[in-house]
Amino acid sequence: RGLGEKSRMGKYSSPYEEEEEFVTKPRGAPQQPSVMRLFLAFIAGAVVATGLLAAYAKSTSRAPLSCPTAAELCPDVKGAMTEAMKSCPRAAECPQCPSCPRPDCPPPSCPKCPDCPVCPQLELPDSLTKGCPEPDRAKVAAEYRNAMFANFQATVGQNILECAPGKDCRADRSRRFQRIGQKGVTLWFTGLSGSGKTTITEKLEQELIFRLGKNVYRIDGDNLRTGLTRDLGFSPADRAESVRRASETAALFADAGIITMVTLISPYRNARDEARNLHRNKGLPFLEVFLDVPLSVVQQRDPKGLYKKVAEGKIKGFTGVDAPYEPPMQPEVVIKTHEKSVDECVQQLLDALERGGYLDGETAESPALAVPDGGEVVDLVATGDELHALREEAKTLPGVPLRDVDVNWLQVIGEGWASPLRGFMREGALMQALHFNSVLMDPHNFTGMQGYLERQTDWLGVSSYPPERVSMPIPIVLPITNFTKSQVGKAEAVTLYNSAGKALAVLRRPEVYEHRKEEIIARCFGIVDPDHPYVQLVQSAGDWLIGGEVKLLGKITYGDGLDEYRLSVRELRQRFVSMGADTVFAFQTRNPTHAGHAFLMTDAQAQLRKKGYKKPVLWLSPLGGWTKPSDVPLDVRVRQHESVISEGMLDQETTVMAIWPSPMIYAGPTEVQFHAKSRRVGGASYFVVGRDPAGMPRTSDGPLKGEDLYHPDHGRYILSLSPGVGKMRFASFDKVYYDKRDHNMKPKDKTRKDDFISISGTKMRTLAKLGATPCPPTIPSDLVAAKCIPPGFMVEGGWAKMIDYYQNVDTKEWVKYSTQHEAPPLAPYVRAEGDSKFNQIKFALHFTASTPHLAQSAAGKELVSPWHHVALGDQSTGFNMVVEIPRGTTSKLETQKELPNNPIKHDQKKGKIREYTYGLTFFNYGMLPQTWEDPQLVFEGSKGDNDPLDVIELGAASRRVGEVVPVKVIGNLKMIDQGELDHKILALALDDPDAASINSAADFDQKRPGVLAALVDWLKMYKTTDGKEVNKLASDTPDSPEQAVAVVKQCNDAWTKLAVTKETKAEGFWIP
């Protein structure tokens, strides 16, 4: 005891467990009278006990009670004593007889009990007792104890029930464990005296109690002998009884949730197996810990000189020497204290407890996996009948549009990555996240506060203090605009739509509250950088937030070729279990993997094997959500990781690559806490974290532009101390360098600095842009100047993918981050160009010859132009509208005037696809073919906008992209947009149920009140979320149908001059 941290068990002596050995000492002459008196008193007590047992047996029988006889009350003590003293020099008189008990016999049915004879006091000189044999007191006591137990079981024990049937007498064990945050378990330490049981368990007890805050108790010979086993000796029978009592006690403690350590030599295998079976029968865990130390080592240690006394013959029957010790056959833990330090032995036990899940009150599906925050996997994806019913309901609810980043967050919530969050944050949850980086919760309803975060925030209604704090460091919120807020109104549920107009989820009991952007930015980011990319997302979003619990309408997929790597929390955890993992460690990356990263991952795996894990599995976890434009695209990273695994830089058998769906918000120390939390939810118990996690350079102009926003060491430091971190452990690393001698990445050896090269991410990107080739045998220190890449830095296939990307950044279209590519419903006569996908810049829809309502000019053409070849029609038979943006779609699609055949493509600006973020479209938007708003035509100082005539179809049905729909014109709104006149022709499909009764905008407003007012608001405000000014309307009241038809005729005439007679010249247009 009191050893230093570096001491080893082989160099110290463990305290001797005195209670575990019986020392036989020769009797000395001065002790003879007292020993004789003890002997006589014992004989007298034994025979009296015999009588009492007989009386007890009769009293428990069904026969009528009768008074005992004199012989029963006062047995022949003298005869028994005489028999025992035959070898003594002379006979002794009877010792004093104890007082006789008298039964409570009701007269007169019972005769008077006889008087007991009184035995005279016996005092024998020491000379008479010399040489008398020592009685086997333990044997006599054991025999009577066994007889009592047998009688008890036969008469009374069988009628004792711990709990009446159907009644809960004790708190539920699993709920008890959940509340106290640990599970009860018995660690049964066995080994030779001096093997270190006491030393190890004392240190383990200190670690568990004071470092980990666990409830622990040690049961050893000392605290047993002072009470529970003080009537036992050291005979084999008494030793077995001692083990039985210790195991019963340990089982009670374990049932109470206490980590219980039993430190008895317990030399007999059968007794230990009985202890194990006792726990098994009670459903309690039992770990046999064998301190496997050779006899020669403990003899050399001999802390109290007992082995020396054994060698001198002063002690007989010593376990392991001249008394048997039966080693365990299959112990759960084997500790060789002569080969490890005390701290190493204790850590081995802590690892065993952690692997078994005993240090946490929650139970995972496998001890190998970390328990999710909140104690259970959150899975909000509807399936089967529930999914069908939910889809039907979704059609009836108000709609809320989602940006790409919002879809990413929805996936994070719905698949459980933000557990226990079950929806976009309500205001109360947001406040806790911003101010505490965590939330309080009561997942098991111990305090009645279960689900309080899923109710309308009540600022004065917190009646109790939820017992569990879980990590929740960043705001996961859904911004909406004033327009969407008005559409939601007092609805009990809303439907969430992506940019293609696909319903992704239903959000229930919406809570709409102010989007306090400044507070979120200040508390989450803690920096002032207006050009920070995620800060800009916050600033440009709506002024309101909507919170509420969600249910996904099926699993979210993206159709980008990477969905096979998108595993939900439940799927990923099942994958780890199926692989036979006994622990999981995660490595997050948003960069390509090079040898430095591989070194960190393989080194972490090796360290876990040293801790006793047999199959630690690596989760290579590329971030898949929204990232800033300068980051390496997701598909490049994933394909490069594939090469790293397939070419052997990482072990295929113990590596899982799975995309983590979260966006990147670049919030440094705050954000990295969420990175770790999500990996813990996914099953990882260890997280590899490097310098400046989740950081980035300052982007705003000024003297600090380009400098790190956060100190590179702060992130991992804060992470290790963050609230709700639980038992997750972190493998931190510093910068590693390329060693020119052995071609490996490693920490720099300061004794040979010139042998090491720093290869930063910037340098790696520069080399890839230069198309660097393998270096010569003599590796230069300036790799950029030499335009070479050293051997072993990256696998060949991975480097080829890096070169491909950096040399074709602008000529190929990459998957920047997870963006859904499922297009809205398409008309059957349009087809996508090549392999182009929705939400790609190159996405293009061409019209084929089967397009309806074609003009004569389209005859014989394989591809036709929706602008020039579809006939306009007229008011009497219906104008032909070409649908570009279906109802509910927010992605801005439009006919391309400049491209051959005028396909429909995404509107984009500076390589970014534009969306209507102000609010969900509640109309079908498109253009009227064979029209053109000639910029030469001026209305009240504004010229035509140089496009085909826009048309807004207000019917109830959602149309398909490219669909040609016959409509009737009912009005026109004249929008003034930056000096241009942009007519918005209002129309209604001829097949709309109300088409026959609606002939004007006034008719429509009467039939469907509120729609036109919402449209006016939408047209004025839809650009404001892009940072632009409010649009102006010449009038909020639509023109008459006649005026609107006149505008159509005017624009048709302008088109005729442009495309048919060619009287008007326009640069850049494709005209057949």
Image: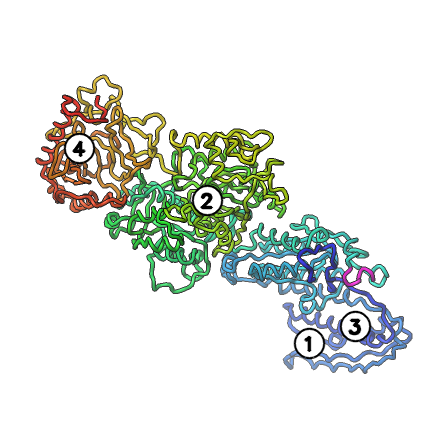
Badge nearest the viewer, 2 or 3 = 2
Q: Residue 149, how many percent across, how many down?
A: 68, 64
**Which residue position holds label 2?**
569
Q: Quadrant of the N terminus?
A: bottom right
Start-end of magenta stretch: 302-309
Residue 399 appears in the rendering: yes
Identity, as a three-letter code, of the amino acid under mark 4? Leu
Labelled disc at residue 43: 3
Labelled disc at residue 949: 4
Q: Which element type, helix, strand or loop, lies under badge 4?
A: strand
Disc 2 crowd rating (10 Å Cα; few below 14, some 14-19, many 20+) is many
Disc 3 crowd rating (10 Å Cα; few below 14, some 14-19, many 20+) is many
Labelled disc at residue 67: 1
Mark 4 and mark 3: Cα distance apart in space:
119 Å
Q: Quadrant of the C terminus?
A: top left
Q: Which element type, helix, strand or loop, lies under badge 1?
A: loop
Identity, as a three-letter code, of the amino acid under mark 3? Ile
Q: Residue 729, how many percent across, how many down?
A: 54, 51
Mark closer to the chain start, 1 or 4: 1
Identity, as a three-letter code, of the amino acid under mark 2? Val
Mark 1 and mark 4: Cα distance apart in space:
119 Å
Mark closer to the chain start, 4 or 2: 2
Mark 2 and mark 3: Cα distance apart in space:
72 Å
Residue 996 appears in the rendering: no
Q: Which element type, helix, strand or loop, lies under badge 3?
A: helix
Examine the image and state in which quarter residue 1038 appears.
top left
Nearer the observer, 930 or 160 = 930
- Vertical comparison of 369 with 450: above or below: above
Q: Residue at x 32, y 26 (%)?
A: 833
Q: Is residue 308 magenta?
A: yes
Examine the image and state in which quarter residue 242 appears.
bottom right
